Amino acid sequence: MLNLKFGSLSVTGNYRDNNEDACVVDELGRFFIVADGMGGQAAGEKASELATEIVPRKLDQLVDFSSDVGDVLTKKIDEAVGEANSEILALNELNPSYHNMGTTIVFVVVSAGKFYVGGIGDSRVYCLRDGELKQLTTDHSLTRALVEAGTISEEEAATHRYRNVLYRYLGSKEGGTGTESKEHSPQSGDRYLICSDGVTDGIKDPEIQTVLAANDDPQTCAEAMVQAALDGGSKDNVTSVIVYVE
């Protein structure tokens, strides 16, 4: 059995009128989810709310967290997220006030002692292990695609005018094409951050590493991460979920 400790904080931030982020911390430690809604006021909030309601419910229905691993589990995760995508697309069509709404989703699902990490959009999962910080997810942003194609550099991507433009998110046709979940073997001492881009809008990887390393209590760490992002000038909602492996 993995012994996990966790904490979370989601705030509106200094520049927005409402919080379009949402997060789920399963009290049994089976899954941790962050969603970052978009599409203006009510629409973005509704999209992230739907994602964080539907995905946990479907995971509860579909997954045997004591034994499901590998392709069996990743297909069930994709089914859960695919259902959320379908619901968001349907509401897009039915209700004019929700037209063009969407949301990112990023998660850690814990099953049979393994972590399954994936997502859609540009929210992220990081792991700090043995003093090294690693991003475990891939951003589905135009700038990331341009970097991977060799068209622009990492430095150019940081200030590129398309850095916040996504080519995959929930509420798009591409949102139903899978979450690219990867199996990750947790180790004692690992520290994980699951976050919206409000965190990375305010602080870069070296500061994320510093905050993760400096706080031994995960709730204190979640609060410190959010504060560091706000202090760093984040102009978005900010959500941080922290998981420690004991």
Image: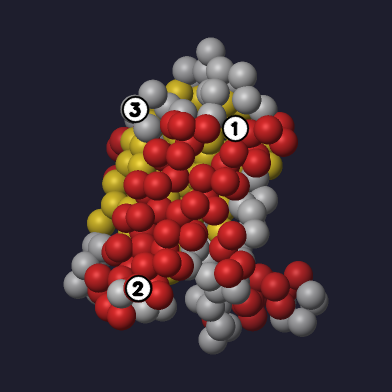
Rate crowding at label 1 as few (under 14), some (14 to 19) or many (20 or more) other CA atoms within 10 Å. many
Cα–Cα gap, marks 3 and 2: 34 Å
Upstream in the sequence, badge 3 or badge 2? 3
Say which label, 1 or 2, has the lower sequence index.
2
Q: How is the image coloured?
A: secondary structure
Inter-mark Cα distance, 1 to 2: 36 Å
Q: Which residue is mark 3?
A: 27
Residue 110 locus on image (x, y percent): 54, 29
Q: Is residue 48 left or right of residue 105?
A: left
**Mark 3 Cα shell of 10 Å, populated few (<14), some (14-19), many (≥20):** few
Lower sequence index among marks 3 and 1: 3
Residue on which the image places disc 1: 115
Q: Please tell me whether residue 108 is drawn above or below residue 34 in the rendered image.
A: above
Location of residue 24 in the rendering, given as x and y in whole percent from the top left corner: 36, 42
Vertical comparison of 145 with 35: above or below: below
Gap in angstroms between the C-alphas marked 3 and 1: 16 Å
Please tell me whether mark 3 sits on a helix, a strand or a loop: loop
Dividing the picture into quadrants, the one containing residue 92 is bottom left
Q: The residue under label 3 is which amino acid type?
A: Glu
Place of residue 234 in the rendered image (x, y in percent of width and height, measured from the top left): 36, 68
**Local crowd size for mark 2, using a 10 Å CA cut-off: few (<14), some (14–19), many (≥20):** few
State left or right for residue 115 relative to residue 225: right
